[in-house]
C-alpha cells in the first residue's frame, strides 16, 4: 500500500487541537501533516520492515537504558515540529534535559519539540523523494541527526544539521556521533 496525501487547505485548515482530535478519533489510522498542512494517511508496514524496525528500536532502548541520556520513541509517536509539521519518525530520541522542559500537558498530546535524532526505515511502497522531503522537514524543524535507511538499495543517507547529506553504500554499522554518544547500530 502507498501513503495517501490529502490536500484540503483551500477548504479547511485544521488547528493543532483539531488535528490531534482527528488522530484520536481514528486510532486505527496513522496520520502525518507536512509543513504545507497537507495530511498524509500512512499505510501499515509489512512483516520484514516491522521486524527490522522492532530490532532497531530494541538496540536504541538497550543503549539508552545503559546511558540514561534521553527518551526513545517508536513510530506511533507524533511530534509537533517547530516548522508546524506533525511527523512520526520510525525511531526517535530526545535528550532527557530537553524532554524534561516540556510540561506534562505538552508530553500528553503531540509533544511540541523536534527530536534530537530521527530514523526513517524505507518500506518497499515508500517514494524515495517523499521520504527525503520528510527528512529535510525534520532537519528544518531542528533535528540534529537523521538516518534514512534504504534496504532495497543497501544505502543509508545521513542528515546532519547544517551539513550536506552523506550517502553510505552497504554500511555494516552506523555511529551515533556526538548526538547519540557510544551508540553503534549494526545493520
Image (cartoon, rainbow, N blue to C red):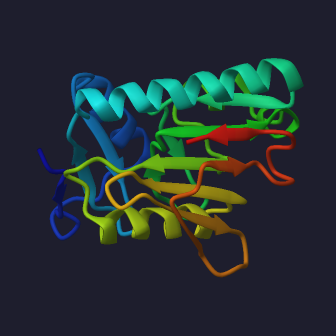
Q: Is residue 37 left or right of residue 74?
A: left
**Left or right placement of residue 41 versus residue 33 in this view:** left
Location of residue 143 by image quarter: bottom right
Q: Which residue is at the front of the view, 85 or 69?
A: 69
Residue 144, position as x, y percentages in the image? 72, 60
In the image as oriented, which residue stretches furthest toward the bottom?
164
Residue 128 visible somewhere in the drawing: yes
User: Residue at point 32% right, 72% down?
Assistant: 129
Q: Residue furthest left?
A: 1
Quadrant where the N terminus is found in the figure:
top left
Of the 4 image quadrants, the one containing the C terminus is top right
Q: Does residue 4 appear left or right of residue 145 in this picture?
A: left
Q: Quadrant of residue 103?
A: top right
Can residue 76 be seen by looking at this rendering? no
Count of numbered labels shown in the rendering: 0
- The residue drawn where x is 77% and y is 25% is 64
Q: Position of residue 157 (x, y in %)?
A: 54, 65
Residue 64 or 149: which is nearer the viewer?
A: 149
Q: Nearer the viewer, residue 102 or 187?
A: 187
How far across and how far down the image is residue 41, in percent? 21, 45
Tell which of 37 and 57 is nearer to you: 57
Residue under the point 82% across and 54% down: 177
Q: Residue at x 16, y 58 (%)?
A: 6
Q: Position of residue 56 (x, y in %)?
A: 55, 31
Amino acid at each position: 500500500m502507498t501513503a495517501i496525501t490529502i490536500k484540503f487547505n483551500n477548504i479547511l485548515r485544521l488547528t493543532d487541537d483539531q488535528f490531534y482530535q482527528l488522530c484520536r478519533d481514528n486510532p486505527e489510522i496513522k496520520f502525518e501533516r507536512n509543513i504545507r498542512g497537507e495530511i498524509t494517511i500512512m499505510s501499515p508496514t509489512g512483516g520484514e520492515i516491522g521486524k527490522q524496525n522492532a530490532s532497531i528500536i530494541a538496540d536504541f532502548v538497550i543503549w539508552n537504558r545503559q546511558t540514561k541520556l534521553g527518551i526513545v520513541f517508536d513510530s506511533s509517536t507524533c511530534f509537533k515540529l517547530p516548522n508546524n509539521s506533525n511527523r512520526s519518525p520510525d525511531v526517535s530520541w530526545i535528550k532527557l534535559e530537553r524532554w524534561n522542559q516540556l510540561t506534562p500537558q505538552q508530553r500528553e498530546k503531540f509533544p511540541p519539540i523536534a527530536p534530537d535524532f530521527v530514523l526513517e526505515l524505507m518500506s518497499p511502497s515508500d517514494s524515495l523523494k517523499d521520504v527525503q522531503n520528510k527528512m529535510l522537514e525534520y532537519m528544518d524543524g531542528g533535528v540534529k541527526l537523521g538516518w534514512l535507511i534504504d534496504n532495497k538499495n543497501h544505502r543509508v543517507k545521513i542528515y546532519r544539521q547544517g551539513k550536506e547529506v552523506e550517502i553510505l553504500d552497504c554500511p555494516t554499522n552506523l555511529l551515533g556521533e556526538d548526538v547519540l554518544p557510544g551508540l553503534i547500530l549494526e545493520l
